[in-house]
Amino acid sequence: MAESAVTGQLLASPSFLRKGLVLLFAAACALSVANVYYAQPLLDAFAADFGFSQASVGMVVTATQIGCALALLFVVPLGDLINRRRLTIAQLFLLCAALIVVGRASSAAVLLAGMLSLGLLGTAMTQGLIAYAASAAAPAERGRVVGVAQGGVVIGLLLARSLAGWVADLGGWRAVYFVSAAMTLLMLAVLSRVLPPQTAPAHRISYLKLLYSMFAMLASERVLQIRGVIAMLMFAAFSIFWSALVLPLSAAPYSFSHTAIGAFGLVGVLGALAAARAGHWADRGHGQRTTGLALILLLLSWLALAMMSYSLWALVLGIVLLDLGGQAIHVTNQSMIFRSQPAAHSRLVACYMIFYAVGSGLGAIASTSVYAAAGWNGVCLLGAGVSLLALVFWRLSLRYMPQASVSQSESSGA
């Protein structure tokens, strides 16, 4: 089988090569996912250039999330069907083309179509690489490997805002997407040379059966269902914060530049690096405990964020707590769901991330609408409410987790 061949190849390699490949997956994930999030600190620029209102500019982010959902439904599952290496190269080429389209957009319709394409291709690349890394890892280290790759995703997500703000201040928002196109070409050159070869699965199924199997997973995999709902609520809280942050910080009394606003994303890197450890904790059997603690941190973060008008240090603290809690949940979720069907990692991550796309899209449009109606305090109340709902759902769902999963994630590690 392809999966076992790749696993054997990696495990038989020298230690430094295995670590190098894991770091490569993380770096590639960071560069890919950044394309999905460049728009968030640029929403005011889009509103000015394309005539969006303050309440409707969240559609730019929502269009990206629609692309994410389409990728998860129709593209990411292909990793279980065809050669992942070839699929990755093709996606990188198309991603570069989509970035150029966005950079040259002359109307709101073209911009939204381009954002949808970036969401589709950036997500397909990112989640495909995570599934690749998970399949290649030995079961005993899968949580750690996923944690490193996911750490790359989070760092790319957070640095995207800083890079977008800095480049936009130097050359305008269009330069952000042209610079990203150049970085994508560089990534294409590197990955085409160093990604390990992978053959297609010996037992092939049709594309339609592949898609149907995803719906069967969503209907029958209890761990996927429960952890997916937790992810949906957590990502909604994330999107509520990051989609609205640019609006108060770009207005009086702050009137921050895009560079300054994007720099707040750097603060979240601290939380992301700490959260990567959550995969190791899940490997050792502490997944549920980690989830509970992380959800409490997520809820507490909104108290600090609500104090932004009194102190920007409160904003900094809130960002650290938000990213630490949210990413610890995300890494733990993936570690748990990847245990259920080792031969279907691409489909599992696709199903799981559908919950992410729904939560992020709803959070973005709700956030800007609430900000227009109730200001920053309204946004914080909305985020706290969603975070509290996630905590309550997690606590009530413990009794419904499959016993094998609970004992594996809570009792096996030592």
Image (cartoon, rainbow, N blue to C red):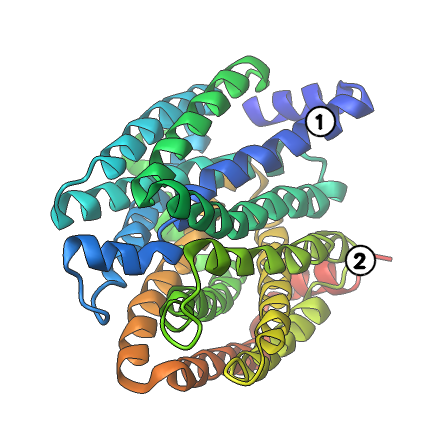
Residue 258, x across and y down, in percent: 42, 56
Q: Secondary structure at mark 2?
A: loop
Label 2 sits on residue: 412
Q: Amino acid at mark 2?
A: Ser
From the top left corner, tell me how far across and down residue 21 is, in percent. 67, 27
* Residue sitting at x 41%, y 28%: 81
Q: Amino acid at mark 1?
A: Gly
Q: Nearer the viewer, residue 259 or 35?
A: 259
- The percent coordinates of residue 123 (x first, y second) are 40, 42
367 in relation to 208, above or below? below
Residue found 68% across the figure and 41% down from its top: 145
Is residue 344 visible in the rendered structure shown here? no
Vertical comparison of 12 with 389: above or below: above
Mark carried by residue 242 = none
Q: Are marks 2 and 1 in contact (CB under 8 Å)?
A: no
Q: Which quadrant of the view contains residue 239?
A: bottom left
| The residue positioned farthest toward the top in the image shown | 193
Q: Residues within 10 Å of mark 2 (few under 14, many from 20)?
A: few
Q: Quadrant of the C terminus?
A: bottom right
- First of labels 2, 1 by sequence position: 1
Q: Residue at x 54, y 40 (%)?
A: 30
Badge 1 is on which residue?
20
| Quarter that holds the N terminus | top right
Which residue is rendered at x = 47% and y = 52% of the image? 161
> Would residue 279 be found to the left or right of residue 223 on screen?
right
- Asked whether residue 408 appears in the rendered view, the answer is yes
In-image side of 66 versus 359 (left or right): left
Q: Number of callouts in the render? A: 2
